Amino acid sequence: MKRSRLLSRSPRLRCLLLAAACLTPLFGAETWTDKRGRTMKADLVSVGDDDAVFKLANGKRVTLAVDLFSDEDQERILDWEPTEADEADEEAKEAEGLNFDAPWPKKVSFNGDPDISTVEEDKDESRFVYESANYRFVCDVRLSKSVVKGFAVMFEATHLYCRELPLGISGGVKSDGKYQILLFEKKEDYVKAGGPPSSAGVFMGGKGVVMVPLTSLGVRPVGSGYMLDRDKASGTLIHEITHQLTPPRYYAKGAMGWFSEGIAEYLTATPYRAGNFKVGSNFDDIRAYATGYGKDDGGGRALGESVRMPALKDFFLMSYQEFTGPRANFNYGMGLVLTTYFLHLDGEGDAARLKSFLRALRAGKSGEDALKVLLDGRGYRELEEDIAKAWKRKGLDIEFDSPASGG
């Protein structure tokens, strides 16, 4: 996925990060100089399209825009190639999050009271920064710690849910050790920053951040401050937070669309309240969400009880532009149906084939090469029949169009 220019567009944020980096000398590391002549010592870890990741002495990583640096250092960054040691370090870091052999959770609970720290409050710049264990919330208005604590529970619980699913959901771009959330008091400012006008929140893939208008969190002005409606629905935001934590390789062709959206829909459809996800008993809720408007009309894809699907191969390999096009609601719903099949209805119901597929993606396979692992010797037509039979037993009739070639 394309890296962000978020830092280059936000001078206050990039200066804050660079200042923090300058305060942490690293023995034996390289010296980097910005356009104003300020220096920092750090190891260069990776380079994206617009940003570079540096490792500080305390082990924390900071992501900085390449165009922050002097012309000479920009050339050094863009010419950088990882050594075998660098690649091994990144592989080890990635492997820390692999948990494919862990049991499927029955319930995921974030029971603690989020410890919120105030990092910055600058009224003149309309910049207020708060942090929880895993997240940095950058807001354009001042919020009380109690309000931040209230919505931070949902972010931390979703992080925990993603990590406890035995699917290796260990991705996400951190800035100085935190996942970044941008909060906007006014919906129009959220839209100006790139948020879709009809959305309650959005994951900006190129930037690695989730953007949210405060109204979507149930935060509203009261007098000179703000209060939180703790009963505000959180489904859309859970979806976007899941995207933020999903490894980039799970967005490769062959998984992009049906699985990358399907797994986010799966978390969205799981019953959630006050830091608790009821995972072990979520199947009926998922079915209700996919086929109707969810329980108590709490949102859903409204596929109905009888669905006509494109040929499975075509759906698996659909471009993301088409997936999110005019039939996006249908495609998201069917992504959830297929993901749920591979999680709970395929084979022994242990997601074995899906886990092998995800491992193949992590190993660099994509497209039909990765899908061969998911098919596991079956043809596409045979898999269509297996999916239709399994879901029919659950009350959902699926009819596929004529099989794609090679199936």
Image: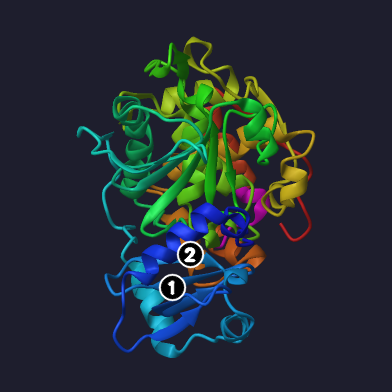
In x, y percent, where is residue 101? 29, 57
In x, y percent, where is residue 127? 48, 40
Q: Tell me the crowding category of disc 1: few under 14, some 14 to 19, or many 20 or more residues within 10 angstroms, Cα based.
A: many
Residue 379 part of the magenta-drawn span: yes
In x, y percent, where is residue 391? 54, 32
Q: Relative to residue 69, is residue 303 drawn left or right?
A: right
Colouring style:
rainbow
Residue 72 part of the magenta-drawn span: no
The residue under label 1 is which amino acid type? Phe
Q: Residue at x 60, y 40 (%)?
A: 335
- Quadrant of the drawing holding the C terminus: bottom right
First to last magenta residue range: 377-383
In x, y percent, where is residue 28? 32, 89
Q: Are marks 1 and 2 in contact (CB under 8 Å)?
A: yes
Residue occupied by mark 1: 54
Residue occupied by mark 2: 63
The residue under label 2 is which amino acid type? Thr
Q: Earlier in the sequence, mark 1 or mark 2?
A: 1
Structural distance between the alpha carbons of marks 1 and 2? 6 Å
Q: Is residue 385 visible?
A: yes
> Between residues 390 and 158, which one lies in front from this camera angle?
158
14 up-or-down from 120: above or below: below
